[in-house]
Amino acid sequence: MNKKRVFSGVQPSGDLHLGNYLGAIKQWVEMQEKYESIFCVVDLHAITIKQNPEELRKKVIEIAKIYIASGIDPKKSVIFQQSDISEHAELAWILNTVTRMSDLYKMTQFKDKGGENENIGVGLFDYPVLMTSDIILYDTDVVPVGEDQKQHVELARDLAKRFNHQFGETFKVPDVRVNKEGARIMGLDDPTKKMSKSASSTLNYIALTDDPEKAAKKIMKAVTDNDGIIKYEKEKKPGVSNLLNVYSLLNEESIADIVKRYEGKGYGDFKKDLAEIVKQFLISFQEKYNAISDEEVRGILTNGAKKIKPIATETYKRTKKIMGLN
Ligand code: AQP
């Protein structure tokens, strides 16, 4: 039986953080064993906000290195750069013609990123359509993402179905997969909002490229509460619950076991141990990251694009044909 296909990606903008790793990349690593896996560095998405071209070039290499250092094996999975395959943008244009303004106005991420502002870029508004194109271009079965991207994958499902209904069976309708535990890692300085690379303070997140000592200090400074009891209560104790979540995912241990171990102990002990876990995780991650050369990554991206170009070409041809285009 043919393996099911997985597709996902991360934007080469800002610093990749523990939220991106625990919410998305960590599950990709597990899934690559069972699925035919395609992981993209989505640079066309990154340019929906202003980027410095030189920085962007570097960032693409950095993200691909992060994939590999996290455990994505280029022998098992395809890793490629979105702008290497022109069909992403071409199919997005076609999909624009079946997308309604009302579909996109509903997207909470667009609203969060300043949807009310008249001067906001059209690209940011259209971002979910490009994301739909990324996914359905490869006849994707499953899209593993963090909670914040779930709505976009649901739109991809709707657009694929709408297109199929209008023109005839063309696209596979993808399923979304959100990892229950890492779905939403919260900001360390404000645990009521998601950890985000565009946060105003670097105390909000732990970047995968952060100095491990400094990262440990960020854990020590993380916002908690005053009742001094270590337990998981997302609504009442968002800070402690978030730290428990990170602890559990990095140490591969259940939250219940961790809570039991810290019974009667204070936040100081708990944070100190978590700070050490984060530090050790980063040391080991960065060791792998630093062992990969830029040249190697460029080769992997080029090979990845070569490998999957035929799938994209076939889907795009099929789409044009069914619509009466050349
Ligand atoms: N805090 C988070 N918890 C769990 N998963 C998260 N993801 C992002 N933040 C969290 C998941 O990471 C993947 C890649 O995301 P992206 O960088 O392409 O875009 P994003 O979701 O917009 O990430 P950021 O950090 O929040 O960026 P900004 O600040 O620019 O908005 C996705 O699967 C995402 O769900």
Image (tube, rainbow, N blue to C red):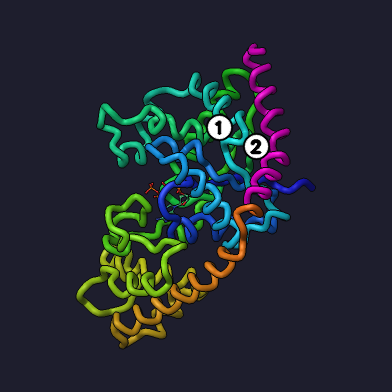
Q: Which amino acid, mark 2? A: Tyr
Q: Determine which of the numbered discs, if any, sits on residue 133 in the image.
A: 1
| Label 2 Cα crowd, 10 Å radius (few <14 / some 14-19 / many 20+) | many
Task: Give the percent coordinates (x, y) of residue 52.
Answer: 41, 41
Q: Assess whether residue 316 is covered by the magenta stretch.
A: yes
Q: Secondary structure at mark 2?
A: loop
Q: Is residue 98 above or below residue 224?
A: above
Task: Give the percent coordinates (x, y) of residue 35.
Answer: 68, 52
In the picture as drawn, the residue positioned furthest to the bottom comes out as 264
Looking at the image, which residue is at 67% across and 13% down?
Answer: 326
Q: Which quadrant of the figure has residue 316?
A: top right
Q: Earlier in the sequence, mark 2 or mark 1?
A: 1
Q: Which quadrant of the figure has residue 175?
A: top right
Please give the residue where the numbered disc 2 appears in the rendered image: 138
Left or right relative to 39: residue 104: left
Q: Is residue 199 above or below residue 152?
A: below
- Check mark 2 vs ligand 1: CB closer than 8 Å? yes or no: no
Q: Nearer the viewer, residue 39 or 284?
A: 284
